[in-house]
Amino acid sequence: MASRHVVAPHRLLFAFKPRLSPPTFATRIAPPLNKKTTITRLSFSVSASSMASSPKKVLVPVANGTEPLEAVVTIDVLRRAGAEVTVASAEEQLRVDVCHGAKIVADALISDCADAAFDLVSLPGGMPGASSLRDCKVLEDLVKKQAADGRLYAAICASPAVVLGSWGLLKGLKATCHPSLMEQLSSFATAVESRVQVDGKTVTSRGPGTTMEYAVTLVEQLFGKEKAEEVGGPLVMRSNHGDEYHMLELNPMDWTFDKGPQPQILVPIANGSEEMEAVIIIDVLRRSKANVVIASVEDKVEIEASRKVKLVADMLLDEASKLSYDLIVLPGGLGGAQAFAKCDKLVNLLKKQKESNRPYGAICASPALVLEPHGLLKGKKATAFPALCNKLSDASEAENRVVVDGNLITSRGPGTTMEFALAIVEKFFGRKKALDLAKALVFTHP
């Protein structure tokens, strides 16, 4: 009979609740006209008819050294809401080398956007990316005009202090940022420790671990509470923001790595992969100092993910398959999962991984659409995206956000990816390192 171990048994595991309410994410401050009034509803559109007839336009600038998780999660969530998001490079070329060895291809250069009007400009953090954004004169002029025209502008992590503060755009406002920059922020604004802070038409947030809350708050500011709930529900976000993460573990076994001084991990990507899940997994694992290989199953290294974010792999799967790995982990996304399931080379790698009792895992659509049909869940408990759990042969533990069964790890969706990635860190390096990383990410309370 399988042994059963629930990590952190003092607290219940959280099942998917389809309509979480985003207003709990942000602390809101009323516009200056009446500082005692709590904002319950904000709209910055000219009229209801114009809101219905034309999409909201959003600018997300990126630079070398931008935090990829903060950029990609924001882009993905806003596009889910129907916003027309332009990813603009502050460099001289569209391809941007963001933090942790990741690469993103922008839609345009910042210079191409100088005369455009946006309903929202959202600045990701990351260093030295934030400094590059601060020093971009075209972007500075654009955001200052955004503020002067009374339109939304936002920033996360380093950028509230490094960018907005230095441009004088936080005067008289309450704002937050990464914990390490709070002292610097306090010279520009009233610094608060909210995970997400809304003051008038300015939104700020703390770091990678608060990005999804930040992004859903931006949806609420642009489209209203109902749209934010509609977008937030399928993300499978957790309700206990800031608390320790938990996983269900069955048949505990040690995950070891003998390929080198750090775990060797393969993360395949394909056209249609869920970019949030891929980037969060890669970002968190590389922060833990694991050696992560991003491999495209397509015929070129650049792929277009499910929400049209263009990611660049390290190599093609043909090359990556020549190596052996301590873990193979699949992001979700319907199109990406379907591509994985049809890729014989990847399926064979996964089967060899299972047969040799080495760890493998998947999230969202991939447990149901890749692992299950190829017999890779046989005799295992697993979870998947809620709407696909009926495809699992054994869904008895599917309500858990992260399930580890021996050498298999599975999880539910974009909003559980951080917990999923941290659970992988815990299995290789121990819970203390995972919790320390969670605090550094501001996923849990610092």
Image (tube, rainbow, N blue to C red):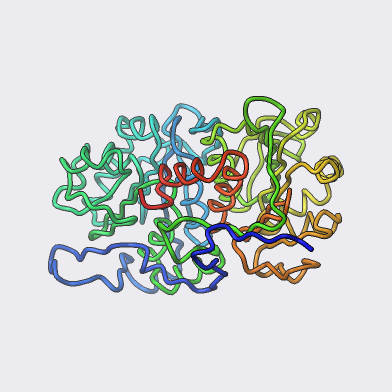
**In x, y percent, where is residue 313?**
65, 34
**In x, y percent, where is residue 77?**
50, 57
Foreground of the two, 241 or 37? 241
Foreground of the two, 317 or 255? 255
Q: Number of numbered discs present?
A: 0
Figure quadrant of residue 101: top right
- Would you place residue 382 above or below residue 19 in this image? above
**In x, y percent, where is residue 89?**
45, 35
Figure quadrant of residue 383: bottom right
124 sits to left or right of 316:
left
248 sits to left or right of 359:
left
- The quadrant in which the N terminus is found is bottom right
Figure quadrant of residue 263: top right
- Would you place residue 329 above or below residue 263 in this image? below
**In x, y percent, where is residue 18?**
54, 73
Foreground of the two, 48 or 384? 384
17 sits to left or right of 135:
right
**Which residue shows up at 43% across the image and 56% down it?**
215
**Which residue shows up at 38% across the image and 29% down it?**
128
**Which residue shows up at 58% across the image and 47% down it?**
421
- Would you place residue 305 above or below residue 127 in this image? below
213 sits to left or right of 177:
right
